[in-house]
Amino acid sequence: MAKEFQCDSPECSSHFTAGDSEEMRREIAKHLKDAHNIDTPTQTVMNYLETTSVTETSGRAAR
């Protein structure tokens, strides 16, 4: 099942999808580096974002 991410940062409106959890984690890490200057997010940050900002979608992943 595809995953959908919506960044909750007030100054960011990024939104993207990924095909599975592993791909989503890579995309979130890339987003954090590119958009928020976080080079190496901690496991705690990644887990938090997965539980608060990622939902499952019934459709295919699209960008």
Image: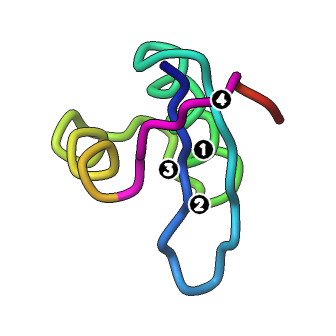
Which amino acid type is shown beneath numbered disc 2?
His
Residues tagged 3 and 4 counted as in contact (Cβ below 8 A) = no
Residue denoted by label 3: 38
Q: Tell me: 7 left or right of 41.
A: right
Give yes or no for residue 57 being in the magenta stretch. Answer: yes
Identified at 24% across, 48% down, the residue is 51
Residue placed furthest toward the right: 63
Residues tagged 1 and 2 counted as in contact (Cβ below 8 A) = yes
Secondary element at image label 3? loop
Residues tagged 1 and 3 counted as in contact (Cβ below 8 A) = yes
Residue denoted by label 2: 36
Residue denoted by label 4: 59
Which amino acid type is shown beneath numbered disc 4?
Gly
Mark 3 vs mark 4: which is more N-terminal? 3
Percent x, y for residue 10? 55, 86
Which amino acid type is shown beneath numbered disc 1?
Lys
- Crowdedness of circle 3 by 10 Å Cα count: few (<14), some, many (20+)? few
